[in-house]
Every structure is written in structure tokens, then in C-alpha cells.
Amino acid sequence: MTTQTATPLSSVGSFLTGAGRILVILLIILVAFSLLRFDSFVSGANIRNIGMAASILLVMAVGATFVIATGGVDLSVGAVLVFSGVIAAKVMAVMGAEGWGASFVGILVACLAGTAWGVLNGFLVAKAKIPALVATLGTMGAAQGLSWIIAGEDLKDVPMELGDTVGVGDFLGVPMLVLIAALVTVVGGIWLRSTRFGRHTLAIGSNVTASREMGIPIARHLISVYALAGGLAGLAGILSLARYGSTTISGHATDNLSVIAAVVIGGTSLFGGRASVFLTAVGVLIPASLENGLIMVGLNTFWRDVMVGVVLIVAVYLDQMGRSQRR
């Protein structure tokens, strides 16, 4: 009988594939930009901006964590955000685009529109047996195209109450967007870790055959998971509309990359079965901080996509390396 002794290299590898990895990456980014532009980057106003930018991504990333935990992927979240915002803006315009009545209807319509796309994604994956990558790539194109067809141009029909309270308002000094994202994160984290729904989600990602033999309704559960992701993308759509006062149809082309990167960097395995909503919340700060910092130092923000892409590849490689060591 032989025993394996952990080497310093394996210990470092284990640390870098866990929570430590994401904290190290985030710390490096924050320290680098703080040294380059301390007064601007570390200011209270800039920290607020980073938090507000990260909040919209975080709402989508919570749903994406559930999807990726099943071993799936959803590339449509950015397009669903845009579509939901367009539909909400159209409905609120019909209602006069003013008052809390129109605002509440807009919020409901956005969430329902996003959920509808999520149900479609789930049906294509679970019932039609189309690979998630292909199914959500198709719905991404459809949602983006329909947004342009319906809107024709960016819409700005946002009630003042919605924009002032949710978009740029705060409570006890904390932006409402940050509070909403924090609430979604706490509920999502507890739901994933402490409920039957969450346990079934992780079980399907770990071994779909064993989950089926345990009596878990795989198809129904997958549809529910994708519906959850779609609904949260819809919520992100109305939050984006409230913050920017416009549907910003062309401004979310790389949201899917940022969301998936945040989830994977946060320790959720692309192969399913392991996930953490709370670490996803930390992972979201990476693309948000990168974009903000690059603006501060005067570099093109397209470098953010390059850096996020590199970090995503490294995170997946470390995840694969960790899986190989556990076998």
C-alpha cells in the first residue's frame, strides 16, 4: 500500500484551482491599477462605479452558475438582456413611460420575456437534444435580431421613477443596483447549496445517468434551470435600462464572455457538478475592474476582452488539471 505525499507544487496547484485563484487574480488587478492611478481608481466614486457595473453582470452570472453547474452553457444571456429591455421599454412607452405603475409592469414584462427565452433554451437542450452551445448560440442570434427588428433604434422610454430610484439611486449610501445584485446572490447561493433544487442541479452536472436512476426528472429540471437563467437575464435587462436610460442594443455583445468568465474563474467547473454562487460574485469583479482600470490608464477597453479571454482559458486549464489529478 502506497501513500501519496503532497508536494509544494501540487499544494500550489490545489490552491490556484480553488477560492485562492480568484482572489489572487482580483488582487493583482486591483493592486496594478491602484499603483498606476491611485487617486482616481481608489476613490469612493470609482468604487461605486465598479460596483454598479458589476451588479448587472452579477445578476446574469448567478443564473449562469446554475446552468454551468449542470454541465451546460448559455451564450444568449447578453442578447436576452437586450431583448427584455426592448420589450419592457415598448410596454412602458404604451403606458406613458411615467409613474411606478408603468415601472412595475416594465419590470414584470422584462422578467417574463427573459424567462420565455430561458424556457426555449431549456426545451431545445433537454427535449430536442440540441447541444447547449448550439442551441443558445442560435437563440442569441434570434434575440439580438428581434431586438433590432422590434426597436429599430435604441429606445429611451424609461420612467423617471425607475431611473432615479433603481438606476442611479441608493439606500443608506449603497447603490440600489448593488443591493439588488447582492439580494439575488444571497438567494441564489442559498438555493444552490441548501435546497433540493440546488442539489439536483449539482447532481446532474456530476453524473446525469446516476441522477436519472435516482429519479431526478432531468428534462424538467434542465428547463427550470435555463428558465431561471433567462429570468435573471431579463431582470438584468430592466436594470440596464434603468441605469443607462436606454436599451443600448449594441452594448452587450461581450456580456456572455464576461458572465461565463466570471462563473468559471469563480470556481464553477465547465464540466458541471461543482459551483459556487458566492465565488461567482467575486469573479464578476474581475471584468468590471479590468474595464474600469483600462479606462483610467487610457487604454482601449477592447483590451479587457483580451485579458478576460486569457484568464478564462487559464481558469479552464487549471480546472482540467485539477480534474486529472483527482482521477
Image (cartoon, rainbow, N blue to C red):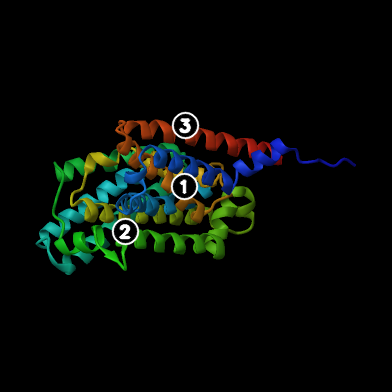
Q: Amino acid at mark 2?
A: Leu
From the image, tell me which residue sits under label 1. 283
Q: Amino acid at mark 3?
A: Val
What is the count of numbered marks? 3
Q: Amino acid at mark 1?
A: Gly
Q: Residues within 10 Å of mark 2 (few under 14, many from 20)?
A: many
Q: Earlier in the sequence, mark 3 or mark 2?
A: 2
- Residue 230 shows in this picture: no
From the image, tell me which residue sits under label 3. 310
The image shows residue 222 at horizontal and vertical percentages of: 48, 52
273 relative to 59 in the view: left or right: right
Q: Are marks 1 and 3 in contact (CB under 8 Å)?
A: no
Q: Residues within 10 Å of mark 1 (few under 14, many from 20)?
A: many
The disc label shown at residue 177, or none: 2
The image shows residue 52 at horizontal and vertical percentages of: 32, 53
SS at mark 1?
A: helix
- Camera-side residue of 188 and 169: 169
Mark 3 → mark 2, Cα distance in angstroms: 28 Å
Mark 1 → mark 3, Cα distance in angstroms: 14 Å
User: Residue at (31%, 31%) from the top-left corner?
Assistant: 299
107 relative to 194 in the view: left or right: left
**Direction right: furthest residue:** 1
